[in-house]
Image: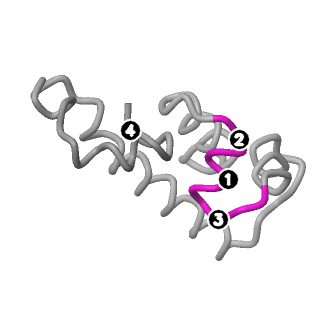
Amino acid sequence: MSNFPSLAHEITRCRQLLQLSQPRLAQLMNLKTHRLSDLEKARSIPSDAEATRIRRQLTQILHEASWMVRPSSPALALDPRLRPLRGQGIAC
């Protein structure tokens, strides 16, 4: 048994942390919704290359989102540069 969470668990954790739907996360990751669903429900086993790519994408998405949710700067929430991201459902 491996020492790291399963890919299915990582996908679920990412979606829950960011409060994203499967279709939205699939869009961010350039996957078809049914493919993401199959991976998240462990109905399909990805190749090693695909698993590595998906883990890298999840890490990047979480990293990019983390600065947006920090309450360290109230002015950041009002920053007009975030408008396009809000429109895409990425930023709050």
Marks 2 and 3, the one that precedes in the sequence: 2
Q: Position of residue 82 (x, y in %)?
A: 28, 44
Q: What element carries label 2?
A: helix
Q: Is residue 44 left or right of residue 19?
A: right
In front: label 2 or label 4: 4
Q: Name the residue under label 2.
A: 22
> In the rendered image of this protein, does residue 55 appear above or below residue 79?
below
Residue drawn 49% across and 29% down? Answer: 17
Q: Nearer the viewer, residue 55 or 48?
A: 55
Magenta-drawn segment? 21-32
* Number of other residues with Cα within 10 Å of mark 4, as a class: few under 14, some 14 to 19, many 20 or more: some
The residue beneath circle 4 is 91
Can you identify the residue that label 3 sits on?
A: 30
What is the crowding at mark 3: few (fewer than 14 residues within 10 Å), some, or many (at least 20)?
few
At label 1, which amino acid type do we have? Ala
> Going 70% across and 44% down the picture, which residue do you hit?
8
Q: Name the residue under label 1.
A: 26
Identify which residue, 25 or 45, lies in the foreground: 25
Q: Are there few (<14), some (14-19), or many (20+) residues within 10 Å of tag 1?
A: some
Upstream in sequence: badge 2 or badge 4: 2
Give the Cα separation between the discs numbered 1 and 3: 6 Å
- Numbered disc in front, either 4 or 1: 4
Secondary structure of the magenta portion, mostly? helix
The amino acid beneath tag 4 is Ala
The colouring scheme, among rainbow, by chain, secondary structure or one colour, is one colour
The answer to if 5 sits in the magenta stretch is: no
For residue 59, which numbered disc appears in the image? Answer: none
Q: Are marks 1 and 2 in contact (CB under 8 Å)?
A: yes
Q: In this view, does 9 lie above or below 81?
A: above
Q: In which quarter of the image is residue 86?
A: top left
